[in-house]
Amino acid sequence: MPDIDPTSEFDLAGKFETKLGSEPADERVYRVALQLYEPARVAAIAERADCAPDTARRHLERLVDIGVLELVAENPATYQRNESYFEWRKRSRLEQLSPGQLQSRLDELTTRDQALRERYDADRPGDVDVLDHADYDQVEEVWMELSEWETVRRRIKRLDDVRKQRAADSESEAA
């Protein structure tokens, strides 16, 4: 049997780079921009997107114009994700759900939240001491579950905000 590198089957980053390399420059810059959680300069973005800095700058300016990115410094030009844009997109998608779908998702998430509250005997993930709930080799699993719990709580808030906005809109239309 030939020697096979088991990691080669799961080289997701390599596959992503190969696929990204075949995309047009504007798409490559956009995909890099989606990952800009920390400020980055044009040169670094251009390198990651495999394009010329002038090309990256042109596309980055367009992404600022439509709200995807924020220009956080001008000299040198430095960009990062506009988190409020992404929050708006998430809420817009939720607003497309029917009241039943919205309530169903809210029910699922509140059930998961309650299960995690009971499991950790805490009101929120920040109240949990990981070492109280895990041996050394299980710490990562507990951190992952607490991270999931944070996500569940953010989603509940977002869904509840959309539900409340709908109720307020209905009341103002009825008035």
Image (cartoon, rainbow, N blue to C red):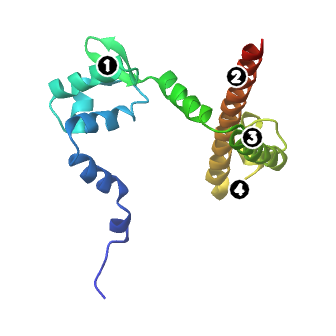
- Determine contact: label 2, label 1, CB under 8 Å: no
Crowdedness near tag 4: few (<14), some (14–19) or many (≥20) residues, C-alpha within 10 Å = few
Question: Contact (CB < 8 A) between labels 3 and 4?
Answer: no
Q: Earlier in the sequence, mark 1 or mark 4?
A: 1
Task: Give how far across and how far down residue 83 sits, in percent.
Answer: 49, 25
| Secondary structure type for disc 1 | strand
> How many discs mark residues in the rendered view?
4
> Which label is found at residue 135?
4
Question: Nearer the N terminus, badge 2 or badge 1?
Answer: 1
Circles 2 and 3: CB distance less than 8 Å?
Answer: no
Residue position marked by numbered label 1 in the rendering? 78
Label 1 vs label 4, nearer the camera: 1
Does dot 2 land on a helix, a strand or a loop?
helix
Q: Image quadrant of residue 135?
A: bottom right
Q: Which of 44 and 155 is in front in this view?
A: 155
Q: Residue at x 27, y 52 (%)?
A: 19
Left or right of 83? Residue 77 is: left
Of 117 and 63, nearer the camera is 63
Q: Quadrant of residue 168?
A: top right
Which element is circle 3 on?
helix
Q: In this view, does 66 lie above or below 145?
A: above
Q: Compared with residue 119, is residue 68 higher up or lower down, i.e. above or below?
A: above
Precedes in sequence: disc 3 or disc 4: 3
Could you tell which of marks 2 and 3 lies nearer the N-terminus? 3
Q: Which residue is tagged 3?
A: 103
Residue at which label 2 appears: 165
* Mark nearer the viewer, 3 or 1: 3
Mark 2: which amino acid?
Gln
Amino acid marked by disc 4: Asp
Q: Identify which residue, 44 or 159, lies in the foreground.
A: 159
Compute the Cα span from label 4 to label 2. 44 Å
Q: x%, y% of residue 76?
A: 25, 15
